[in-house]
Every structure is written in structure tokens, then in C-alpha cells.
Image (tube, rainbow, N blue to C red):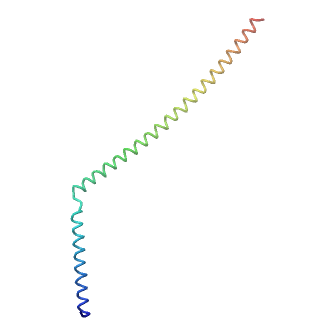
Amino acid sequence: MSRTEFIIWTAVILFVAFCLGWFANWLVHRFTRVSAADVGELDRMSQELHEAEETRDQAITYLQQREAELTNQLSQTEAELRAAMDGLRDARQEAEELRAYVERANAS
């Protein structure tokens, strides 16, 4: 086998390998191609996912606002309760002082 024949046979073998690889690639892409219906379904699903994420974000925002309102309301109620308890304590102390004064006045 001469040098020229060797080069020709190598070129033929490489060309055949290239053609087989290209044909295999074409077959793989032919059988794994996504149909238009699948693309439409994926578009619909992505749109629904986007809407669900927006709804979730709105719900989170609403819950955070509601939590802030309830925390504020709880703080106000606790402050009112403390004020009422202080007033009740002062009223009891005053009533006790008046009772003691009346008892001393009656005793004399």
C-alpha cells in the first residue's frame, strides 16, 4: 500500500465516520424534537407559574401588613391594660386610705 492509497483510504474512512455521526445526530434530534403542542403547554405552565408566584407575593405582603397591624393593636391594648391596672391599683390604695381614715374618725 502506497502512501497515496493510505491517505485516500484514511480520508474515505473519516468521511464515512463523519457521515455516520451526522446521520446519528440527525436521528437523535428527529426523535427528541419538541412538538408545537408541547411548547404551547410549557408556555401555559410558565404563565400559570408566574401568576401563582405573583399571588404568593401578594399574599405574603398582605400577611406582613396584617401582622404589623395586629402587633400595633396588641401593643396599644397592652398599654391600655397597664394604664387600667395602674388606675385600679391607685383606686384601691385610695379606698384603703379612706377606709382607714373613716375607722380612725369613728374610733375617736
Tell me which residue sits at (68%, 17%) in the image. 94
Q: Residue visible at 21% across and 57% down?
A: 36
Image x and y of residue 89, in percent: 65, 21
Residue at 28%, 54% (x, y): give it: 43
19 relative position to 76: left or right:
left
Nearest to the observer: residue 101 or residue 27: 27
Which of the 4 image quadrants contains residue 91? top right
Residue 17, relative to residue 42: is it above or below?
A: below
Residue sitting at the far right: 108
Q: Is residue 103 left or right of residue 34?
A: right
- Is residue 73 depicted above or below 64 in this figure? above
> Looking at the image, how many numbered discs can be counted on the residues?
0
Q: Is residue 28 above or below residue 39?
A: below
Question: Where, quadrant-wise, is the N terminus in this rendering?
Answer: bottom left
| Residue located farthest toward the front when viewing the structure as drawn | 1
Q: Quadrant of the C terminus?
A: top right
Left or right, 75 with reference to 6: right
Q: Position of residue 104 (x, y in %)?
A: 75, 9
Quadrant of residue 77 within the rendered picture? top right
Q: Residue at x 37, y 44 (%)?
A: 55
